[in-house]
Image: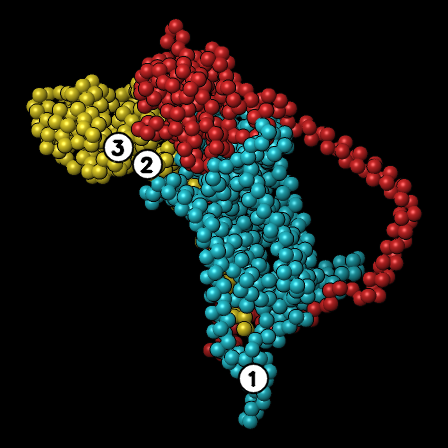
Chain colours: A yellow, B cyan, C red
Amino acid sequence: MRRAVVVLVGLGLLATATALGLAGAAATPSRGNDDAGVQQGRELFVTGCAQCHGADGGGTDQGPSLVGVGAASADFQLTTGRMPDTDPDRQPVSKPPAYEPDEIDALVAYVASLGDGPPIPDVDDPPGRLTEGGELYLLNCAACHSAAGNGGALSSGRTAPDLHGATRVQTAEAIRTGPGPMPIFGPDTLSDRQVNSIVEYVRYLDDPEDPGGLSLGRVGPITEGLVALLGLVALAFACRWIEPKEHAE
Amino acid sequence: MIIQRVARWIDNRLGASRAARTTLNKVFPDHWSFMLGEVALYCFVILVLTGVYLTFFFTPGTKEVVYHGSYAPLDGVKMSQAYESVLRISFDVRAGLVMRQIHHWAALMFVAAVIAHLMRIFFTGAFRRPREINWMIGVTLLILAIANGFTGYSLPDDQLSGTGLRIAYSVVLSVPVAGVWTAFLIFGGEFPGNEVLTRFFVIHILIIPVAIAVLLGAHLAILVRQKHTQFPGRGRANTNVVGARLWPTFMAKTLGLFFLTFAVLAALGGLAQINPVWIWGPFEPAAVSAGSQPDWYVGWLEGSLRLFPAWETRLFGFEIPNPFYSGVVIPGITFMLLYAWAFLEARVTKDYEEHHLLDRPRDRPVRTSIGVAALTFYVILFAAGGNDVLAARFDISVNLITWVFRIFLLVLPPLTALLTYRLCRELQARDHEKPRPTAVLERTQSGGYVEVEEPAGAPRA
Amino acid sequence: MSAPDRERRAVNQVAVAFGVSALASLGLAAVYWQGGQNQVEGVLLAIALGGLGYGFVVVARRLLPQGPYTEERDVLPSSEGQVAAFETDLERGEGWLARRGFLLKMLGVAAGALGVAALFPLRSLGPNPGNSLRRTKWRRGSLVVDEQGEPVRVRTLEVGGVLTVFPEGHLEREDSQTLLIRISDENVVTRKGREDWAPEGYVAYSKVCTHAGCPVGLYQQDVKRLLCPCHQSSFDAVEGARPMFGPATRSLPQLPLMVDDNGLLRAQDDYDEPIGPGFWDRGR
């Protein structure tokens, strides 16, 4: 029974992975540094981004310079909808992307053309290992994003976001580029394989095995405590049912 | 009948018939809130039953092993024997996970039921003479329940339990003069130490459960000797107990409650996942997870550690570190006040009489307000124990939420006390306007009986 | 409904409840036999126990005598005569004891000595703390290695990067865990007297929180601030991990670093103060 479930989940993961892999492969050529893309990207940039990041991407007091941040950073910020953002004082949060995929590709190509920076990572090669990913995740990532990937609070009103729902590529991009408060894990700190292993584990956390039943959000003792109190309330009602007589006043 | 023959056989040897008959006829008052203590008792029974099963599979060792069980994401990972055996119980021992989950849910429910029972005793004044001894035994049972919960939480050697142990170590370390030696003796050296798991195991499965069982026995024996309290009412006086007899009615009720308690815990154990240690990961000294929390009954201590300002005492090169105040002094005062309450109240009210009739909370507005204020205080501490989770969930700054809780902690208890006091007075006044039954019967002209009602507004005794 | 009808109905209810319970128990056994499944086990067990519970409660409420019964309380305190008699009997031994005060004192001495002697074995529970809270495994020239034991080079971290490191040969030592942060690409001075402690922008702080000992694992690279996830103390990584918020009162100790001729990071020495949470004679 359990084995069947595991096999099914495994097949599902494989299918999704393949689909994503294909999508990634199909998208790659258009993300090249072709001049037409860069040109289209520059136009989009001037209308949508230049106000904060400067006409040539060199940054203003409203937004940082994008010279040398690389394709990975631009792709992460745009596909997670963090950019464009209207309030430079608040931490940008994930929302539906403002641009169509081909527009994002053009913008990414333009930002990548501004200077050398981390490229969009290939999350399938070299393939990650789930177990290694789990160990690295718990040591390097869980302190902010929590063991279950639910995210957590940082100091001064910042938060580490919930990781559920991030794509594999976005996860790898975040590790490599360190968006916002997040530290940067460059290729000399974590190898490509190690990054891909973490990506596998983060993907696993999207829908981990819950052999015990309802996950309760995998938040831990807080939700468990509330559920236990609900259980006690249920038992208090049982007590009232056993002793229905109102005491005489 | 076979039962009668057995009874006769026993009586011939022990002469127990008279005592047994008194027991069978013992009267239990029939108010639902009297069953909260029974829920606690049955949680303990269920903890022992499921706990014994778990001991057959659990290994309390810190020796490093490599996992090769059926949970794939941890395959090949190095971990302690303790953590490995909990994974085995959860994934490979048939019925192991359901037992483990029932055990953990029962632990959460046990402390909750003890506290609910304590609140019932407190707000109705059931701790007054002659029940001060049982009040103190009850407070001791609460402490033991929390202690056993914490030792149990520490055993699986996952990341959460390691984090909890680390904080406990720091709190012990903070005790003036004796802290360092005490911590080294408990942990067998500097944290993490190699001994603490085996020691906590013995404490968790032997020392504290036996202490709880013995004190429970005394708690119940004293209850039988002193008989139950009861709410005032028709036919009820300070000199009697009115209710159902132990045999057979109460026996059926309480057995029913035992099975219902067990059923709720079984349903939780089957349907609601608790403490998924495979997600938290094996304990690594250098790792920690955001949102790490203790089980709920330690949450108020966690909140105290989080809210306490950055103060500590340094004198002549010696220091009393910050966690001593938040982690030792605050719980110390809490339990001292609980122990002393029965005597403190008698002293203040100068009421040293025997009481077997309970107060309605509204009729003791001062006690009720103090109780509500204390409850508010601990609920705020409890909420503060999850300030980071609240901050992340509701997108508020941790710093802000911490300050809000610090202010709440000082402002809200007096406020809720005042409100409660006013509410009690209000309810009393309302009672005043209603005619009240007096338990005096008068014969009507038609030959029936009708109860005389005290006119509204009459002064209350 | 008449009384006998009500009773018959209650009997039926109880019978059905016990029957359902029995079926659920059979199901439970069968599920176990078939390999077990947590949710099914929990639900069947709940039904088996709930059926029994429901049955017992209906029996209690509908089929058994309801009372109310009244039981008189006995007077708890014993009568004066009984107390006096007890005191007389107690006197038998007490008087003897009072006359033999010396023996009593000697008994006290013996019992006290035995008690003290019995405390000695507690000493076996743990080692002498000695200096162990004041020293870590970092030494002059210790090679800085990551969790896998790989040495850390100047190029290992990018600016804004962070890594948990240990002294070579002491991987995963609780007291030596150190957070290595690259906050810049040139020498950083976090405090007066620490002019050469952070070469190439590498600062290293003890990862053990000075409040309650949790690993201070959160680094916010945009504001260069550290946060302890247990009790939310935050520390300023630029200014020697000075506490900024929360219950921590002391800075995280900083490890002085140097870069050797091969571009590897090494410790200049051990921490210059005890790491981790406070204790009574920490300052001595």
Kind of residue sitting beneath label 2: Arg
Q: Residues within 10 Å of mark 3 (few under 14, many from 20)?
A: some
Question: Is B409 placed left or right of B450 in the picture?
Answer: left
Against C137, residue A134 (above or below) is: below
Please identify the quarter of the rendering in which residue C102 is found.
Answer: top right
**Which amino acid type corresponds to the residue marked 3 in the rendered image?**
Thr
Camera sees residue B460: yes
Q: Nearer the viewer, residue C214 or C203?
A: C203
Do marks 2 and 1 share a subunit?
no
Element assignment for label 1: strand
Above-or-below relation of B289 to C169: below
Label at residue A158: 2
Q: Which residue is mark 1?
A: B452
Residue at x 25% of width, y 28% of height? A169
Question: Are there few (<14), some (14-19), or many (20+) residues within 10 Å of tag 2?
Answer: many
Which label lies toward us, 1 or 3? 1
Front in this rendered view, residue B102 or C115: C115
Query: Identity of the amino acid at label 1?
Result: Val
Numbered disc 1: what chain? B
Tell me residue B404's x, y (percent). 40, 46
Question: Would you call the spot at circle 1 few (<14 residues within 10 Å), some (14-19), or many (20 or more)?
Answer: some
Instruction: Describe residue B438's horizontal placement relative to residue B218 as left or right.
Output: left
Q: Which disc is residue A167 wearing? A: 3
C-alpha separation, residue under disc 3 versus residue under disc 2: 22 Å
The residue that appears at 44% across and 17% down in the rendered structure is C193
Name the residue rendered at 58%, 73% in the picture. B233
